[in-house]
């Protein structure tokens, strides 16, 4: 038992030290950024990521640093990653729009059915942690209404708590569905960003195949298939083709 306690304490000491070291490096990166030393800031932020730490502010700062060095693809990549932590963050969305404005490819999105757009809006209303907090809150309300129903001796309170409980259970089920969809969306590797200045997309996963079209740095792509180091991509206008993994970074 004593050995288990010592191991537990040792693990926590190591974890706290690592977190403190990551915070120190990030603060150093912030200092580099404030002094317009953007390359050094990028190195510091990337080192934090290599140590296994992620956060909204880390990806946001990294996106800003890449933008200031003119690397639009990496800038958009990190803004997109930051949005996974908080889809509604105004600063991230604003800077992402500015970075998108610097891309060469202006592709019109295929129109979506209104209910599909509404559905996607609801799914992206909160981050994964945000939906989890919603579930916790609704579950707490369910417990409260259940307690009132079983403990109250007044008919109108029992009726009110029973109907409220049913509504809350249904709301919990819908929120759970949105949480699962958001989790799958954020943990899947279905989207990527072009990091090369110019890429020729092929009609098949072969260097000798015909050229399909050309895309440029910063463009966000949907990945639908993979064969070796080739990815099948789809643009928002419906175009499809193949390109090599070295030309993109998965969000």
Image (spheres, rainbow, N blue to C red):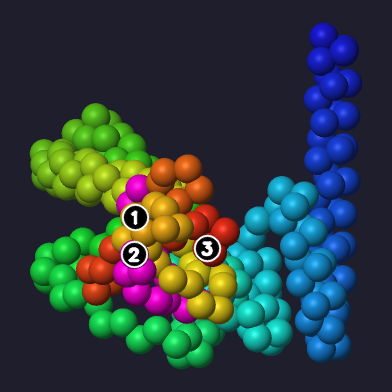
* In front: label 2 or label 3: 2
Discs 1, 3 touching: Cβ within 8 Å: no
Q: Is residue 54 above or below residue 152?
A: below
Query: Mark 1 vs mark 2: which is more N-terminal?
Result: 1
Q: Nearer the viewer, residue 175 or 82?
A: 82
Discs 1, 2 touching: Cβ within 8 Å: yes
Residue at (64%, 60%) from the top-left corner? 55
Packing grade of label 1 (10 A; few <14, some 14-19, many >=20) is some
Q: Which region shows up in magenta?
A: 210-225
* In front: label 1 or label 3: 1
Distance between the alpha carbons at the discs numbered 2 and 3? 20 Å
Residue at (47%, 86%) from the top-left corner? 103
Helix, strand, or loop for circle 2? loop
Residue beneath disc 1? 204
Q: Position of residue 10 (x, y in %)?
A: 88, 29
Residue beneath disc 2? 210
Q: Position of residue 158 (x, y in %)?
A: 16, 39
Helix, strand, or loop for circle 1? loop
Q: Residue 248 has which mark?
A: 3
């Amino acid at each position: 038992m004593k050995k288990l306690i010592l191991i537990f304490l040792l693990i926590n000491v190591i974890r706290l030290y690592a977190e403190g070291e990551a915070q120190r490096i990030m603060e150093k990166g912030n200092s580099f950024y404030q002094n317009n030393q953007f390359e050094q800031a990028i190195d510091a932020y990337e080192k934090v990521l290599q140590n296994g730490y992620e956060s909204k502010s880390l990806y946001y700062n990294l996106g800003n640093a890449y933008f200031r060095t003119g690397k639009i693809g990496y800038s958009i990549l990190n803004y997109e990653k930051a949005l996974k932590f908080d889809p509604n963050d105004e600063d991230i969305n604003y800077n992402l729009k500015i970075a998108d404005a610097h891309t060469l490819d202006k592709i019109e999105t295929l129109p979506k059915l209104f209910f599909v757009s509404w559905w996607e809006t609801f799914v992206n209303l909160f981050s994964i942690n945000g939906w989890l907090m919603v579930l916790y809150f609704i579950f707490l309300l369910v417990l409260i209404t259940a307690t009132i129903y079983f403990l109250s001796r007044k008919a109108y309170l029992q009726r009110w708590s029973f109907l409220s409980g049913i509504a809350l259970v249904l709301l919990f089920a819908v929120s759970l569905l949105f949480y699962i969809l958001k989790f799958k969306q954020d943990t899947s590797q279905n989207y990527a960003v072009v990091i090369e200045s110019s890429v020729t997309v092929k009609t098949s996963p072969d260097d000798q195949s015909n050229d399909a079209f050309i895309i440029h740095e910063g463009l966000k792509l949907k990945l639908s298939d993979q064969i070796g180091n080739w990815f099948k991509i789809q643009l928002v206008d419906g175009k499809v083709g193949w390109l090599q993994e070295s030309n993109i970074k998965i969000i």
